[in-house]
Amino acid sequence: MAGVSTKEIKNRIRSMESTRQITKAMEMVAASKLRRAQAQVLSSRPYFEILYSTIADIASSNRDFSSPYLQERPLKKVMYIVIAGDRGLAGGYNSNILKLVQSEIAGKDAEVLPIGKKALDYFRSKRIPTFTEQYAEAAELTIGDCFSISRQLSKAFLAGEFDRIVVAYTNFVSALAQTPAAMQLLPLEKPEKKEGTNQGDILYEGDSEEVFAAIIPEYLGGVIYGALCESRASEQAARRAAMDSATQNADDMIDDLSLKFNRARQAAITQEITEIVAGS
């Protein structure tokens, strides 16, 4: 019996060592991807910050300026762009953002545009209508896809299909902290003119409202791409942390099993010695 027990423990130790090798490898891959994702986050921010400053200049420096992108409407239908991952093993990354969206759309007439397999599968299971399932692969999404999404949704907003458009993503705070967030894209809040600036009216070729209408889809595309980069970095940070925790748990289990194995082997040796002494 003692021999069988030690054999089972050895098999479990081997199994845990194999699992530990997998989790350690996944941790190293996630750490490598995290560095690239952080670089993308930093490089994506200046683009839409410059666009936003242009939007602010147009909206605040023209006295009689008006745009359908700035007009609040009675809230009838909401569109949520939801960015999640393509696979699991990333701690609470997917579940946190999906729970946030579920709480946001409760009691509302809402439609979603899922980005990532986990988001698509979740909303399919909840039978929540989707705007399109074209962007189910978050890892394959490009900046061109983000601009395509922004143009489609801008047209839908102007046509009155949606009264509000929101992007739900995970904000990358640090390698140890990621927070789910929901940002309203449309209608835009009219930027206030900064105090202490004596800029006169800016002249645009053609009309300032035409320039504003042309810039908005570009700005939204930049925001969506920035949210995508934040989410990708958050996913890799969450996966690295989850795999690091799994590796540590595997180490603890291996140590515990090794102790049990030594005790079982010692008990088996003691039993054999006792039997030899009793036989003699």
Image: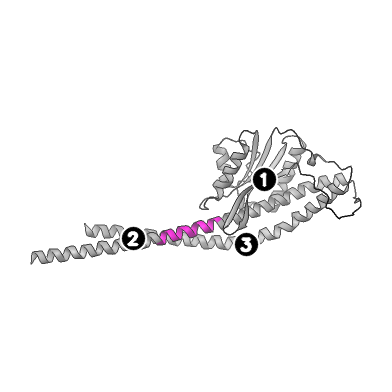
Q: Position of residue 141 (x, y in %)?
A: 65, 51
Judge depth for marks 3 and 2 and give the one in front.
2
Q: Position of residue 91 (x, y in %)?
A: 52, 52
Q: Position of residue 242 (x, y in %)?
A: 50, 56
Q: Position of residue 267 (x, y in %)?
A: 22, 62
Distance CA(mark 3)–CA(mark 2): 38 Å
- The quarter of the rendered structure image containing the N terminus is bottom left
Whether residue 249 is in magenta: the answer is: yes
Judge depth for marks 1 and 3 and give the one in front.
1
Q: Nearer the N terminus, badge 1 or badge 2?
A: 1
Q: Which mark is drawn over residue 36?
A: 3
Render colour scheme: one colour
User: What kind of element bears circle 2?
Assistant: helix
What's the residue at 81%, 47% (across, down)?
Answer: 214
Residue 212 is left or right of residue 149, and the answer is: right
User: What kind of element bears circle 3?
Assistant: helix
Q: Is residue 250 above or below residue 158?
A: below
- The quarter of the rendered structure image containing the C terminus is bottom left
Amino acid type at image mark 2: Leu
Residue 124: quarter of image: top right
Bounds of the magenta span? Answer: 238-251
Name, please, the residue furthest toward the front.
196
Whether residue 15 is in magenta: the answer is: no
Q: In this figure, which residue is indicated by the disc labeled 2?
A: 257
Does the magenta stretch mainly form a helix, a strand or a loop?
A: helix
Amino acid type at image mark 3: Arg
Q: Which mark is drawn over residue 167?
A: 1
Badge 1 vs badge 2, beta-carbon distance below 8 Å: no
